[in-house]
Amino acid sequence: MNETTLVYRSVDGIELEGLLYRPDDPPPYDLVIDVHGGAWSSGHYESGRHYDTKLAEAGICVLAINFRHGPDFLHPSASADIAAAIRFAKTSLGFEYKQLGLVGSSSGGHLALYTALLPNIAAHQDDATDISAEVDFVVALWPVSNPLARYQYVLAWEQASQETWGPNFTPDRLARGTMSYFGSKEAMNETSIQRVLAMNEHQRLPRVFVVQSELDLNVPVFMTESLHGALLDAGADVKYKLYRGVAHGFASSEGPQTEVCIKDVIQFIKD
């Protein structure tokens, strides 16, 4: 495997970088674009290095990307950048691929799903408008599928004693980050994956693997179960798995459930 840093988009004087993990095997590859989390307001393409490296070692090519997010940029900047990254991957990497998908974690899971469902809306168009931003699949890792519901959930948690918040759970930061990107509750609701599916607004319905951690305070199980139900109701080819005894972001570091999860992701992609 080798790693290469590249620029996949220049927009408003900003160069957006990606980190390409290319397997040692010759192409064509299964190809994925990794969309990091960070409450739509932070994060970096290195966030998923642990599982990105494992995917590349299994022969899956990964392009992990940075993109515009809050507080400096508002919706739909991030999903527009992801759509641009998809078009870049289709046209400019210089090698053949077998299929193309998105892997997104936390808020990145939401952005991956939102872009995949609405690949060619006006907000996701760029100069390469004749190239579709459709993808074949999405791996949604503990996704914040309903930004408004999660915003209201963390606002309620802010009222509780900080002693009850638990490790690595900061509802005040999550609330600020969400509002800094969406700017309003109306925008949060508009991008709810459950709402998009229920209103039959989606342009594309790729196959989806939804990963949920049992002890997740950032994205509670009931929220991801509602996503699973919405995907089933829309007729999606969807796999859902709950990983026991682990918390939010577990697959970003070593552990028994991480090993199982990464194997499941690799199997899903290669199937």
Image (cartoon, rainbow, N blue to C red):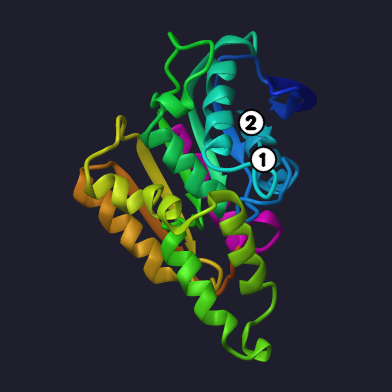
The stretch drawn in magenta includes residue 252: yes
> Label 2's element?
strand
Viewer-proximal residue among 121 and 137: 121
In which quadrant is the C terminus drawn? top left
Looking at the image, residue 241 sits to the left or right of residue 174; the answer is left
Mark 1 nearby-residue class (10 Å; few <14, some 14–19, many ≥20) = many
What is the number of callouts on the image? 2
Q: Crowding at label 2, few (<14), some or many (≥20) Cα neighbours within 10 Å?
A: many
Looking at the image, which residue is at 79% across and 25% down? 5
The answer to whether marks 2 and 1 mark residues whose Cβ atoms lie closer than 8 Å is yes
Residue 203 percent coordinates (x, y): 30, 30
Residue 268 seen in this snapshot: no
Position above or below: 118 against 218:
above
Q: Quadrant of residue 260?
A: bottom right
> What residue appears at the point 38 percent right and 43 percent down from the top-left corner?
208
**Residue at 43 percent of width and 8 percent of height:** 130
What is the three-letter code of the residue carrying label 2?
Val
> In the rendered structure, which disc, 2 or 1, sits on the residue that comes first in sequence?
1
Q: Where is residue 54 drawn, in percent x and y? A: 67, 42
In magenta stretch: residue 261: yes
For badge 1, the amino acid type reads: Asp
Place of residue 249 in the rendered image (x, y in percent of width and height, measured from the top left): 62, 60
In the image, 46 versus 148, the foreground residue is 148
C-alpha span from label 2 to label 1: 6 Å
Q: Main secondary structure of the magenta part?
A: helix
Q: In the structure shown, which secondary structural element does the residue marked by tag 1 occupy?
A: helix
**What residue is drawn where x is 36% and y is 36%?**
117
**Span colored in magenta:** 249-271
Residue under label 1: 52
Q: Where's residue 140, x and y in %?
A: 48, 48
State whether residue 142 is above or below residue 136: below
Mark sitting on residue 62: 2
